[in-house]
Image: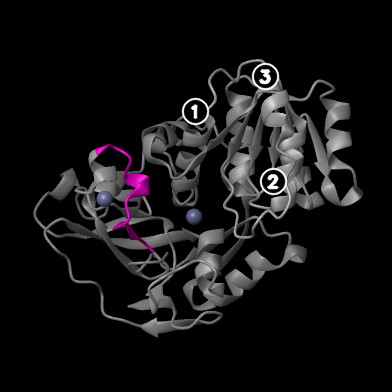
Amino acid sequence: MKAARVREAGKIVIEEVPVPKLGEKDVLIKVHRVGVCGTDAGVYHGYVSAKLPVTLGHEYSGTIAKLGSPSLGGFKEGDPVTASGGWSCGTCEFCEKGTPQYCKSRSSLGRTVDGCMAEYVKTDYRIVYPLPQGVSFDEGANFLNIANVVRAYKKVPLQLGKKVVVFGAGNIGLIMLQMLRATGASEVVVVDAIDFRLDLAKQLGASGVVNVIRGKPVERILQLFPGGADMVVEATGNPLAFQNACDVVKEGGALVVIGIFSKKITELDLSFLYNKEATIYGSKGGGEGYRDALQLLKEKRLNITSMITHRFPLEETEKAFRTFDDKGSNALRVLIEPTA
Ligand SMILES: [Zn+2]
Ligand SMILES: [Zn+2]
């Protein structure tokens, strides 16, 4: 089978590799759609640690091709499915405590084990979920991100009637925007540096948008929310955005960090923690959000397809990543289609 692999940072090669052999608890999934995500880009460029060589990719949908043992997980060949991006060891302190996202022996697709930017991917059956009827492969490939957003969303209770600022109008930020609107946040302001994304944010329900490039984002957010925001979501991973996020949170408000910071924050004014008694939450992974994500997709509560801007065949995986990285390409959700 064909697979898009990284042997050395900065280069993706399409290689012919054997179809993975299954253990008793494994399933083989024929991959139809894979999303390109910042973590994959980090493995490609070398700033996210990975065991090279590795097949990229961890956000996908497909159909069951083969089961490691008869009727494993109740699945049968041809079932449309999606899956989590990895599995934890199940026996360490964190796994036993029910916090597998901290597991140090986690198998992560596209990083420590071969991922899904290939015609087939092998995975543990326990992290595979049937796609509900009516949910497309395009939507299913975003399952993991929706689950991550659900988990982050739940950190702060009662968004009903609240004013929220979302930093970052990428895939995660726009899913968060839609979830907030669907569940009763009164106004959501979205902040980004790319107009195309902010236009999409407006279409998806943002009550206001702020382009940071036009200057003074904090002032402009505070013009829209004079008292500050009840909840601020940081979905950029950009150190500069983090200070802005701290500066617009309201007294007693909450900041939820879902972006992954790859650069250090060299200077930060933390006086708001005392003055405003704000709470900062981190959120990692989708754990408790998996079932809810499938439910939201089934009920058509999220517009996932409007965020898809580009599609590439597996052979053009490197081009897909270059498009994803290119700020001028107006890329948002970039999909790779290994098989029809
Ligand atoms: Zn991802
Ligand atoms: Zn573990």
Residue at point 56%, 43% (across, down): 258
- Mark 2 vs mark 1: in front: 1
In percent of width and height, residue 239 lies at 70, 52
Q: What stretch is highlighted in magenta?
A: 97-109
> At 53% from the left edge and 73% from the top edge, which residue is drawn?
46
Quarter of the view holding residue 288:
top left
Q: Main secondary structure of the magenta part?
A: loop
The residue identified by callout 2 is 169
Per the image, the residue denoted by label 3 is: 162
- Asked if the residue under mark 1 is in contact with the one under mark 3, i.e. CB atoms within 8 Å, the reply is no
Could you say whether the residue bearing mark 1 is in a helix, strand or loop?
Answer: loop
Q: Which colour scheme is used?
A: one colour
Ligand 1 within 8 Å of disc 2? The answer is: no
Viewer-closest of 230 and 18 = 230
At a point 49% along the width and 51% down the height, the residue shown is: 138
Q: Whole-percent x and y of residue 276? A: 71, 23
Name the amino acid type tagged 2. Answer: Ala
Magenta stretch: residue 284 in it?
no
Label annotation for residue 131? none
Q: Distance between the residues labelled 2 and 3?
A: 19 Å
Question: Which residue is rendered at x = 17% and y = 45% of the image?
Answer: 73
How many neighbours does mark 2 have within 10 angstroms: few (below 14), some (14-19), or many (20 or more)?
Answer: many
Secondary structure state at the residue bearing disc 3: loop
- The residue that mark 1 highlights is 154
